[in-house]
Amino acid sequence: WFGPNVTPLHVIVTFAHGRDDKALIADATRDGTFNGGFVELGYTPRLTTTVFGRYDLIRNHTQGVAANPPGLGDKDAVTIGLRRTLNFSHNDAYAFHAEFSSMRTKLDAEDASDLRNSTLFLGIDFAF
């Protein structure tokens, strides 16, 4: 956390490593392994408002199907959003939540035919 306790800027960094058993992957000759993580920045300019941004990535280290290129299925995503608390008390809170996310999945190591998926989310967050 950076800045005042009431209106901080926070940074979250996460790393993960995973392994998929070859029995879970069609035509696999070995286990698949991958690394991933994210970096998120959130700023709270007012007690009731938080603006955030996040960058996620997944990199395949070992493909389960040996003939697949190493980067096949790699993912990158960028998300921006806003949370505005509408009401909070000592028992509960609810907030308006809006975010936009765009994710790219690498489909081919040799050309630029990647898949891009964009999502807009609007909702209400409840906390009890």
Image (cartoon, helix red, strand yellow):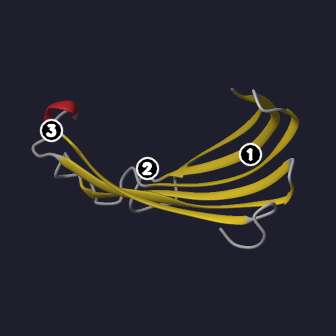
Q: Nearer the viewer, mark 2 or mark 3?
A: 3
Q: Secondary structure at mark 1?
A: strand
Q: Residue at x 69, y 26 (%)?
A: 128
Q: Nearer the viewer, residue 103 or 10?
A: 10
Secondary structure of the residue carrying tag 2 is: loop
The answer to which of marks 3 and 1 sits earlier in the sequence is: 3
SS at circle 3: helix
| Residue 59 in picture, x, y percent from top left | 37, 59
Question: Going by the image, does 78 lie left or right of 122?
Answer: left
Q: Amino acid at mark 3?
A: Lys
| Disc 1 target residue | 100
Say if 106 sits above or below 26 in the image: below
* Residues at marks 3 and 1, CA–CA distance in whole angstroms: 34 Å
Q: Residue furthest front?
A: 90
Mark 3, other Cα within 10 Å: few <14 / some 14–19 / many ≥20 = some
- Circle 3 or circle 1, nearest the eye: 1
- Residue 71 lies in quadrant: bottom left
- Measured from the top left, where is residue 46 in percent x and y? 89, 56
| Relative image position of residue 92 (x, y in whole percent) | 76, 28
Q: Which mark, residue 107?
A: 2
Q: Which mark is residue 22?
A: 3
Dot 2 or dot 3, earlier in sequence: 3
Q: Mark 1 Cα within 10 Å, few/some/many (few <14, many 20+)? A: some
Residue 75 in the image, given as x and y percentages of width and height: 47, 53
